[in-house]
Amino acid sequence: MAEELSSASQGIGEYEAWNQIWENVPADELSFFTRGTPRRFRQLNQKIYFEDMWSMLGKNRSAKCLEMGAGRGTTSMYLAAEGCDVTMLDLAPQAFKLAEQNFRREKLRIPQFVAADATKTGLPSDSFDCIYSIGLLEHFDDPQPLLAETFRLLRPGGLAFHVVVPTIPERRMIVSYALFAPWKLPPRQLKDVTNRLLGRNTKGVDTPMTRTEFGVAEYRHWVEELHAADITCVPYYSYHAPHNIRAVERYLAVPLYRAHRAVKRQFANAPWARTWNCLAACVLVSFRKPSPST
């Protein structure tokens, strides 16, 4: 799910690891931007994030926007295609290189690139109408400084839109697999039993990337402490990749997900990807900076 993962993370040396990741992106994952109908699962989820944010932003084509931990820049490409003034912030030079190639390929205006820590950007206060990230906050042991920096950089009335992709508890993964990919359950259970018999610890394996488990309640509390307005902290995004067979993805899963989303858009307000906690792959953390008059 976390295609736009950030290299602007707190862990020492983590941004070097992200730099390596962006340098070695597989050819079929260079970009998930599409001007047409999404045919792949990752195209779908990236476009859904954008559509929800774009609606909440009021489809403001004059908006000045900042993507934190921008990576390959898919969301920024959608905003640039709508005419917005886009700035991308990251710490990995390879992320900027990849993003620039993606923008040029689609003949989009190249954004301003800012190499900075997302918690201490050095950018002027009250500078942006929209600040957003996809898969960034979960890579911070303490997301509060980044939320505070978001709040500082927003103009009064500006929108923050952070999609968090936390570590999902095993019990929730079982529910998701049971509903969306039941054929995956026996192999997962067999693998778990085998590892236990062999005395292998499959939990808490050291990786170069931090990924926290903070949920809706924690993020809401932190945002409330900022005295933000229009707070939306909800379980988010219930569509799970059902299989690694491309034909199943393209001709069955993605069309079904698109149809389900179309129905939701007829009967609900954005964000349309909000869902029940037992199905959620993400947490949406959204808020506005109050205007002086409020």
Image: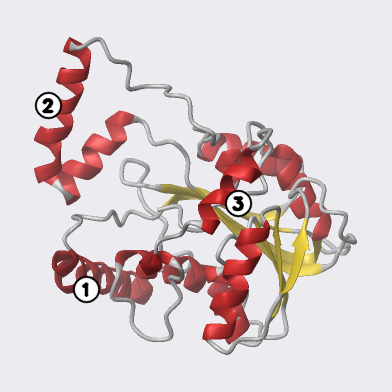
Q: Residues within 10 Å of mark 3 (few under 14, many from 20)?
A: many
Question: Which dot, 3 or 2, sits closer to the camera?
Answer: 3
In the image, 209: left or right of 293?
Answer: left
Specify few, some or many for label 1: CA neighbours under 10 Å numbering under 14, 14-19, or 20 or more.
some
Inter-mark Cα distance, 3 to 2: 35 Å
Residue 59 placed where, x, y %?
60, 81
Verify CB contact (< 8 Å) between mark 2 and mark 1.
Answer: no
- The answer to whether 169 appears left or right of 157 in the picture is left
Is residue 171 shown to the viewer in this render? yes
**Amino acid at pointer 2:** Leu
Q: The residue under label 1 is which amino acid type?
A: Pro
Contact check, label 1 and label 3, Cβ < 8 Å: no
Disc 3 marks a residue whose amino acid type is Asn
Q: Position of residue 68 (x, y in %)?
A: 67, 57
Element under disc 1: helix
177 above or below 265? Answer: above
Q: Earlier in the sequence, mark 1 or mark 3?
A: 3
Point out the frontmost of discs 2 and 1.
2
Q: Secondary structure at mark 2?
A: helix
Total marks drawn? 3
* For residue 23, side relative to residue 122 (left or right): left
The residue sitting at 36% across, 64% down in the picture is 42
Residue 141 screen position, x and y as percent: 63, 31
Mark 3–mark 2 contact, CB under 8 Å? no
Quadrant for the C terminus, please.
bottom right
The residue lying toward the viewer, choosing from 22 and 81, is 22
> Which residue does the numbered mark 1 point to in the structure image?
255
Q: Which residue is mark 2?
A: 190
> Residue 15, how many percent across, how many down?
65, 45
Q: Residue at x 43, y 85 (%)?
A: 35
Residue 19: mark: 3
